[in-house]
Image (tube, grey):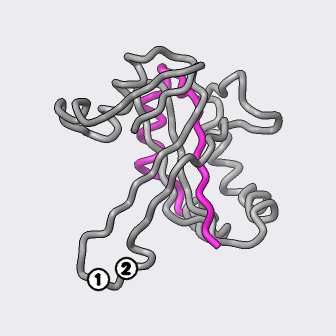
Amino acid sequence: MQKHYSSIIRLKPEYAERYKALHRNTFPGVLKRIALSNIESYGIFLHEDILFSYYDYVGNNITKDLADMADEVTRDWWRLTDPMQEPFPDRKDGEWWASCNDLLFYDNSVNSNKQENSIKRKAFICNINTDYDDLKNIFTTSFLVDKDFYKRLLITYRNGLMFFY
C-alpha cells in the first residue's frame, strides 16, 4: 500500500547554488538506491531557505528500506549535502529533516478509467517558525497561483500553522 511522506529542513543560504548544482547532477547510485528502497514520486522543492521533500513509499518494511538507503554511495552524497542543511530545532528525536503530517491526499486517477483529466490534490501541515506573509509568499511561489486565487481561498494561521481551504 502506498504511503506519503513529506519533510522540511533549512538550506544554509551560502550553499544555495552549490546545493542546486548537486541536485541537477544527482549521483545515479543515489537515484538507484531510492528506487530499490521502494520510494516513488520523490521530489525536493526549494523556496528561499526552506527545502520541502516529498515521496511515496510503496514497500512493506519502511524501517528496513530506509536503513538500506545508507549504502556507500548515498553516504557519500549525504557527506556533501548534510553540511549545507540546518535542521529545525523542534524536529522529532532522530530526525534530520523535520517530518510533516500528511493532511490531505486526493488522487482521482486511481479509480478512473475515464478519459478525463486526472485530479491530484495534496496538502501538508508543517510547523514553521515564520510569519503569515512569508508563508503566503511560499505558497504563491511554490504553486504558481494567480493573484485572483486568493479571492477563492480561505487562509487561516494559528499557532505557527497555516491552513488553506
For the C terminus, give its image quadrant.
Answer: top left
- Height in image: 20 above or below 150? below
For the N terminus, give its image quadrant.
Answer: bottom right
Instruction: Depth check: give the residue in front, 41 or 11.
Output: 41
SS state under label 1? loop
**Residue 51 locus on image (x, y percent):** 51, 35
| Magenta-colored span | 1-28
Q: Are marks 1 and 2 in contact (CB under 8 Å)?
A: yes
Mark 1 belongs to which amino acid?
Lys
Q: Is residue 10 magenta?
A: yes
> How many neighbours does mark 1 have within 10 angstroms: few (below 14), some (14-19), or many (20 or more)?
few
Residue at x 66%, y 43% (from the top left corner): 78
Q: Is residue 92 magenta?
A: no
Give the side of residue 126 with respect to residue 123, left or right: right
Instruction: Depth check: give the residue in front, 164 or 28.
Output: 164
**Residue 19 locus on image (x, y percent):** 48, 36
User: Which numbered circle lies on residue 141?
Assistant: none
Give the side of residue 43 with respect to residue 119, left or right: right
- Height in image: 68 above or below 46? below
Residue at x 66%, y 35% (from the top left corner): 98
Mark 2 belongs to which amino acid?
Ser
User: Which numbered circle lies on residue 112?
Assistant: 2
Instruction: Depth check: give the residue in front, 3 or 80.
Output: 3
- Taking the view exactly as shown, the residue that stands out farthest to the bottom is 113
Q: Quadrant of residue 63?
A: bottom right
**Residue 85 locus on image (x, y percent):** 60, 30
User: Which numbered circle lies on residue 114?
Assistant: 1
Mark 1–mark 2 distance (CA, rounded to whole Å): 5 Å
